Structure formats: structure tokens, C-alpha cells
Image: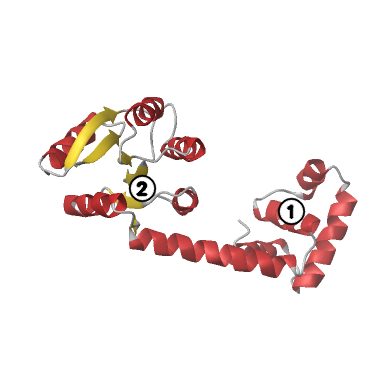
Amino acid sequence: MPIRLVLADDHPLILDGLENLLSTEKDFEVLARCTDGVETLKAVSEHQPDVLVLDIRMPEKSGLEVVREIHKEKLPTRIVVLTGVLDEGDLLEAIRLGVQGIVLKEMAPQMLLKCIRKVHAGEQWIELRSAKQALEKMLRREAGALEVAGVLTPQEVKIVRMVANGLRNKEIASELYISEGTVKVHLHNIYEKLHIDNRLALLRYAQEKGLV
């Protein structure tokens, strides 16, 4: 039995290249090719392929929205994400949603073939460089969040995030429905707890702990 595939990418040239690559392999069968997220979901629902090769950047519905729908509907199709650019947030979200394979378009075509076969066999294939960076960032955030939670109150953490994102006291007060005076009191308490004395130091702290 060949590995039954649906291909999804918004660039026809890439779809052509993928189909040409995969059609030369005797153990692959391309059932459908799609250029947007809605079309992709329809094809996966209709054909229930073994593997979906999916680009993250798709019109109508993004690749991650497609993954969420497949996950929600509990469809048996395994997913390989093939993308040119994958930031840490997208990568972590894809892993959390159960994506089994992630390959960058810059990699050799043989790597994609290997990835599809591994994923079809029930294994996971994630491009190590991107995964390592994203997982390190996630671990820093989780460790930082635990450390911060042991020092600051939830309200104070909100204020730290807002300061780090460039909001002034008046804007913070408006967002939290409190007075500017209360914001200043909170900031004074935050500075004392963290042993710092200005907004720049607070920004650095927020960055170090993965709060922004």
C-alpha cells in the first residue's frame, strides 16, 4: 500500500515541485493538491490521507488553523509541516497540536521524503535546529514564569508585562481600571521586590524571564 498524501501550499510552483518529487517514489500516492486552508480541510476530510504535507502560511485558513481543525475533528491524518520560515511561537504551537513532522523548505528534498516515511511509520521528525531554539525559549519562559510567580503578585506581573511593552503609567491605569497613583504604588513595590530602580532595568528583567 502506498503512502496516501494531500499536498497544501499557496504557491503553484512549489506544489508542482512537490508533486514531481513525490510521484517519482513508488511508495507515495498524491490524492489532492490544495492552495488554501479551506480547500485543504475539505480534501483531508474527503480523502482521509495517511499524511498531509502542509505549509504554515496559507490563505483563507492558516496552516495552524488547519492543524487545529484536524486535531479537533480527530481525523487520523498525520501532518508534516513544510515551511520556509517557522518562528518559535508557530513551532511550539505546532508541536502542542501534535504535528509529527516539521521540515524547512531550504533543506534537501530527500529530507522531506525521509520525514514523510518516518511520520507515516508513527515516528516524529522535527528539524532539530528550529526545535532546539524554540524548546530552549519555552523552557526559559516556564522557568522564568515560575520564578516570577514566587516573587510578584499576578497584578504585578501584568504591570511588568505592560511596562515591558512600552505602556506608560496612564495607559496601564486605563487598562487595569485603577488610578495612576495605584500604578505608581505597584511599581514601587515591584522595584523593591526585584531590587531595581527604573523602567529600563524592569524591561531587562522581563526579557530575561521571558515575559515579553
Numbered disc 1: secondary structure: helix
Q: Which residue is mark 2?
A: 85
**Whole-percent x and y of residue 55?**
34, 39
**Sooner in the amino-acid sequence: mark 2 or mark 1:** 2
Q: Which residue is mark 1?
A: 158
| Label 2, label 1: how far apart the Cα atoms are | 31 Å
Packing grade of label 2 (10 A; few <14, some 14-19, many >=20) is few
Q: Could one spot residue 106 in this view of the protein?
A: no
**Whole-percent x and y of residue 39?**
36, 25
**Whole-percent x and y of residue 135?**
47, 63
Tally of numbered tags: 2
**Whole-percent x and y of residue 204?**
62, 65
Residue type at the position of mark 1: Lys
Q: Nearer the viewer, residue 158 or 55?
A: 55
Q: Is residue 19 above or below residue 117?
A: above
Q: Nearer the viewer, residue 134 or 38?
A: 38
